[in-house]
Every structure is written in structure tokens, then in C-alpha cells.
Amino acid sequence: MRMRKKKHGEERLSRCTHLLVEKPETPITDTEKDFGRVAPLHLEIGCGKGNFACGMAEMYPDVCFYAMERVRDVMVLAAEKAEERRESRPADNLRFIVGDAGNLDEWFAEGSVDTIYLNFSDPWPKKGYAKRRLTHRRFLALYAKLLREDGVVRFKTDNRPLFDFTLLELSDLGITPDFVTFDLHNSPYNERNVMTEYEQNFSSQGVPINCLQFRFPKNFLKEDS
Ligand code: SAH
């Protein structure tokens, strides 16, 4: 059963290979190679079924988006969605990466990324697994390296404990968020908000969505090392 499912997945994925980026020999420095033009580079980590990535790519044709997902079978669904919605995109500006956030620096060069999106990241509620949270300081250090000066990280989640953990990590690192809201959909930051699959699900159940954005201070990495 498992083999059959996987084989099917590979077959489906093979129809979307033009949307997939293979791991480069040297990390990506800009969007030229994959998109044929230099544009702001935005990266979503843990894109799931791809609704956010597709919606953002449609809304911002001048930006090039990479959407990373570590589960290949989930990535297939995202790539298929992007293929179905191809006509809705004014520009060819969306690619997918099957990969793990822990290896981001093998994919992207230092100072190459303008914006990172973390949407409904796995909460890893047990304390012993805190290091796996995508807003743990070990990941934040990685994002700080990849982001251009003044690049931003935008994070949204239904999960209040993960959100509070994130606020503490930022505060411990001396980072003041650009904004914080505990109810995105009833806040001024909801303008042009593209909902993810999880977000649609949770908000239809009346769960408020937490959202924050931050950037790293100029001397962040120097102070850190
Ligand atoms: N962003 C989507 C999915 C949220 S679920 C939405 O909001 O609807 C979290 C997703 O992140 C899962 O698909 C999971 O496989 C992926 N993920 C978790 N840890 C990851 C990591 N380290 N690297 C890449 N993707 C990861």
C-alpha cells in the first residue's frame, strides 16, 4: 500500500516538475536562475497544500516565491494546486522545494531572501521538542543569516502557546516585532491577507489567528557569535 501511494505521488509530481526546484550545487543567491529575472525573493516554510503560496504569487506578480515543504506527498498537492491555478497567475513566479528548514542554508545563500513566511508551523508542545519549533532561536539564527538587511519574518498561527513561546524567544534575543496581533482577522494587518488551509479551517471554527512580523537588528549575528 505504502509503495503504491508513493509511486502514485511520484507520478503526479512528475507532471509538475517545472514547478519544482532541485537542490542546487551552490546555494541560490537570487531569482535569476529559477525565474529568469531578478526580483524580491520570498520564501514560505512549511507550505502544506499550497493555498497561501498560490494566493500570494497571484497577488504579487513582481515578487518571486519559493514554497518549501518537507513532506513530499503534501508537496504534490501544493504543486498540483499551483498547476491548476496557473492561469490565475499574471507572472511565472512560484516554485516549490521539497526540503527541511534545518537545511535552508544549503538552499539559500546568505543575504538572499527578502521575506520569510511561517504559517501554522507545527507547535511541538512538549518541552523536550522545543528545538524543533520553527521559531526556536536555532532556526531564527538561520533566518537571520539568509535574510537581506531589513528582511522580515512574518508568522501566523492559531496556537497561542507557540505564539507566546515565539514572543519570548524574540524578547530574549532583543528583537522588537514590527507588529503583534492576537486577532489578525479583526486587525489592520489583515489587509491583503491570504489565508492558508489551516487558517481557513481554524477561523471557520471561530479560533482567532495570531500574527507577528519582525526583522533582525543590524548587529544581530555579530552579537550572537
Ligand atoms: N502552512 C500550511 C500547513 C501548516 S502544517 C497551512 O497553514 O495550511 C505545517 C506544515 O509544515 C506541514 O505540512 C509540515 O510538513 C511542514 N513542516 C514542518 N516542519 C518543517 C520543516 N522543518 N521544514 C519544512 N517543512 C516543515
Image (cartoon, rainbow, N blue to C red):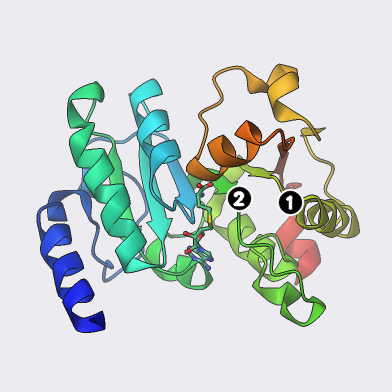
Confirm if mark 2 falls within 8 A of ligand 1.
yes
In the picture, the disc for residue 114 is none
Say if residue 57 shows up in the picture.
Answer: yes
Q: Do the numbered discs 1 and 2 sit on residues whose CB atoms are within 8 Å? A: yes
Which is more toward the observer, 125 or 43? 125
In the picture, the disc for residue 120 is 2
* Left or right of 108 on screen, residue 180: right
Q: Residues within 10 Å of mark 2 (few under 14, many from 20)?
A: many
Residue 73: quadrant of the picture: bottom left
Viewport quadrant of the C terminus? bottom right
The amino acid on which the numbered mark 1 sits, given as a three-letter code, is Asn
Coordinates of residue 102 in the picture (x, y in percent): 53, 72
Label 1 sits on residue = 159
Coordinates of residue 188 in the picture (x, y in percent): 73, 17
Which is more toward the observer, 142 or 75? 75
Tell me what residue is drawn at x 54 percent, y 19 percent: 192
Considering only vertical position in the picture, is 31 above or below 142?
A: above
Q: Residues within 10 Å of mark 1 (few under 14, many from 20)?
A: some
Considering only vertical position in the picture, is 196 above or below 147?
A: above
* Left or right of 38 on screen, residue 185: right
Q: CA distance from mark 1 to mark 2?
A: 8 Å
Coordinates of residue 33 in the picture (x, y in percent): 22, 49
Tell me what residue is drawn at x 39 percent, y 49 percent: 49
